[in-house]
Amino acid sequence: MSGTRRRFFQDAAVLGAGLFSLSETLRAAEPEGEQTKHAAHASPAASRAFQPMVTPDVCDLPHEMDGGVKVFKLVAQPVKKKIAPFKTIDAWGYNGSCPGPTIQVKQGERVRVIFENRLPESTSMHWHGLELPIEQDGVPYISQKPVTPGEKYVYEFTVHQEGTFFYHAHSAMQEMMGLIGFFVAHPQKDYKPRVDHDYGLVLQEWAVLPNNTVPNTAAMEFNWLTFNGVSAPMTTPLLARLGSRVRLRILNLGMDHHPIHLHGHQFVMTGTEGGRAPESTWYPMNTVLVGVAQARVVEFEAKYPGAWMIHCHLPHHMMNSMMDLLRDRAIQTADQTEEKAVGQMMSLAKSVPFEHVHPSPIAPDASSVPGFPQDAFMEMGMDEVVEKPETYGLAKNWSAGMMGMMTMVRVLPEKEYDAILMKKKMARTLAPKEQGHES
Ligand SMILES: [Cu+2]
């Protein structure tokens, strides 16, 4: 038995006899109690229930029923967004969240969105990929007047499609400030084969210069890359029970296309931003290119236990604050071998206001080798700073290898999976106010 596994069971023993009797309850409420929550919110008709997608680090948008209409309220507003333990930016979002809260409906439902603009400038809401009347399309001057600051606007339409859609402001710079969110339409008839876990990831990129908090929306180069509004290692790992089937829905609305790669498993692409793809089109892959304005849906069997990375494979998208760290090295004429460059990288790494480690040693004569440093000094282990139930039991300094547009799928044997669910439940009990922000 490995040390990690032993720790799990020691901890489980401490939790007491309640754990194993609870495990059945937890399984019934999978994923993480979300299913029951949504069924309760939906219309009385049982056929309206669906297994919701979970958007880690982003809440779902609650709704009320008005007769047969599902009513949502969305407020566009500035948002202080902590994208890394040492970096908070001034983004724009919806209902205090960036990206905006996830909207989930069932195919065939009538939807009303009461939209309010609390931004300092006019905006509108576009329903990306949805087939709806032109007056609901949310394009300023073409399908509606701009929604001015302080004004409300009501959108209403019937969702006849199924699939992974999104909502966003239809103004280029506003999109790059973070005004985007998921709009998932669950099918009338369940997809086959059914999945046990359904997760969503919004890809975003930000250009925030050192000592700045406001993203430069005119930039073409980005130094902060996020999944669901946070950079690794702050991204909450996705949990999957060993042997389960997992769906990942990945949505991109930025300036770059992102090749999203999964370690250790093959997947099939089962859908796009246009809905479900026929099974005859599925083929094995492990990297899916998610282009701008696209959604890609992949599914896989979680066959192999472990913490498997999922990340954008563009090298510069696997870093945090690259431009901050590189400084002079970003200028082509700078001498990359000089001591100053090394000193700058080390001093910046040391300047963050919390304890961290640099676990990778360097050679005694490193500075004499042309090209040094590359990844040296960029790794910052900060396990305790980003600790949460979902990170429980990971190897020491796991966070040093996690940066940028990156998270992991933790494929866990039953007892370890249940132990983490138990920890999540306990964390919720201890911090009830944060419950709404738990994925
Ligand atoms: Cu990328």
Image (cartoon, helix red, strand yellow):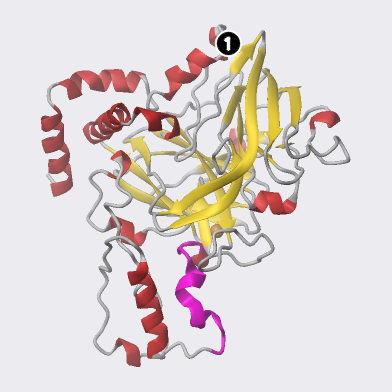
- Residue 438: image x %, image y %? 41, 34
Q: Quadrant of the C terminus?
A: top left
Q: Is residue 224 visible?
A: yes
Over which residues does the magenta segment extend? 317-333
Q: Is residue 285 visible?
A: no
- In this rendering, position of residue 202 left or right of residue 433: right
Q: Quadrant of the N terminus?
A: top left
Q: Which residue reaches farthest right? A: 142
- In the foreground, 204 or 242: 204
Q: Residue at x 58, y 50 (%)?
A: 91
Q: Residue at x 56, y 53 (%)?
A: 90
- In the foreground, 144 or 424: 144
Q: Residue at x 61, y 13 (%)?
A: 65
Q: Which residue is mark 1?
A: 43
Query: Is ligand 1 less than 8 Å from the beta carbon at label 1?
Result: no
Quadrant of the rendered image holding ligand 1? bottom right
- Residue 119: image x %, image y %? 68, 43
